[in-house]
Image (spheres, rainbow, N blue to C red):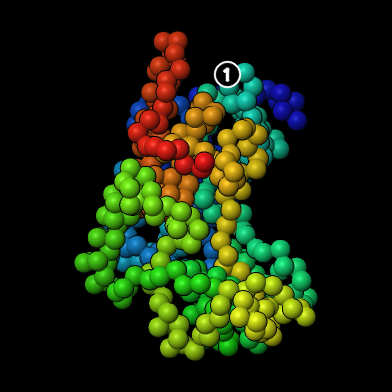
Amino acid sequence: MNGNGAAAERVETVIIGGGQAGLATGFHLRRRGRPFVILDANQRIGDAWRQRWDSLRLFTPARYNGLPGWRFPAPPLSFPTKDEVADYLDAYAARFDLPVRTGVDVDGVHRDGDRLVVTSAADRFEADNVVVASGAHHCPRIPDFAAELNPSIVQLHSSEYRSPRQLRYGPTLVVGAGNSGAEIALEVSRTHPTSLSGRSVGQLPVKHGTNTARFVLPLVRFAGNHVLTLASPIGRKAMPRFLANGAPLVRTKRKDLAAAGVEFLPRMTQVRNGFPAFEDGRVLEVANVIWCTGFAPGLGWIDLDIFGDDGRPVHRRGVVPGAPGLFFVGLQFQYAATSDVLPGVGRDADYIADQIATRVVTREVGAEPVLGRDVTPPVGR
């Protein structure tokens, strides 16, 4: 029974998250004839994209952004807006009649005997398999010293930022020099004196645009999908850097920022007298701070002993050895550098759906299969 007295619903597989990872997993389970339900906290499929900043566009052209079974409905070399992505996900679920239940905010997963139990405020599901597809970028990460900033300073995480209209008049600091920080700093610099704080993450050595999409991005995509993987020595060596720093700058380069008048600052390390202070000792008086400092997966609601010393789930390509029946899709570098983005999530979803189907069939004959053997060592240790 759940808190409302209703009986638990039995489902073979529960997929938590109705974004690209969850929908792709549902597509592949449907192809294999396996029953499942997708639970999503948002009121509409694609809302996680709709809630991002207004001018956001994908870095990859539409030809690479389709989920399995349906290409992205846009000119192949165009760069879709975040709203076009959201609408595509909504239409994708309808096209393949995927059983998505919106407005279900999962707050717990635990084991009860040989089943996994998924709970929300109003629902309880008992499942043989649970796929966590809630996204690698779930909980905003902001340093603790942000609370020491002068209360007059407007503070926004990149997940809250929509446009420069949210900001006070005056100097603006963007903290975090990855792709989000660079894109937001360039936009804000058109209306506010802007500084960008953080270590360089490198950059794609060509200009982003149609020609790049035609000639260079196919090579970048191939490297991200097939070279930088956990199956290759170079991929295993690159993984820690990707997890720590993210991808190199793609569209907005440091020369673009410099041309727009953006000031580059070293890493922000503390707050002094209510204002940001940096590792070179400088203090900057600002009216606004935008935190482009990334996200944590936000998996504390999983009540299972599956996490390594770094707080990440221990898994083999999304299969969790310490919790039979638990799987992940959409984690950062789950198998490859593209695992958490549209061009790469379909392959991982296919793999996990195959693992689930194998597990179900094997259990029907009275055995528990050993899954996820093709990638070593386990990620997260």
Q: Callout 1 environment at 10 Å: few (<14), some (14 to 19), or many (20+)?
A: few
Q: Compared with residue 325, is residue 281 higher up or lower down, i.e. above or below? A: below
**Residue 190, percent across and down?**
51, 86
Query: Is 11 on the left or on the right of 62, as rendered?
Result: right
* Res 113 quadrant in image: top right
Q: Disc 1 marks which amino acid?
A: Asp
Q: Is residue 346 visible?
A: no
In front: 298, or 277? 277
**Residue 285, percent across and down?**
69, 85
Residue shown at 71% from the left, 63% from the top: 144
Residue shown at 62% from the left, 32% from the top: 304
In front: 110, or 230? 230
**Residue 196, percent across and down?**
54, 78
Q: Is residue 65 visible?
A: yes
Q: Compared with residue 3, is residue 264 higher up or lower down, i.e. above or below? A: below
**Residue 64, percent across and down?**
31, 56
* Res 101 quadrant in image: top right
Q: Quadrant of the N terminus?
A: top right
Q: Compared with residue 138, is residue 284 higher up or lower down, i.e. above or below? A: below
Query: Is 221 on the left or on the right of 299, as rendered?
Result: left
User: Mark 1 falls on what kind of element?
Assistant: loop
Residue shown at 53% from the left, 68% from the top: 53
In the image as oriented, which residue stretches furthest toward the left?
Answer: 215
Residue shown at 31% from the left, 46% from the top: 232
| Tag 1 residue | 114
* Res 77 quadrant in image: bottom left
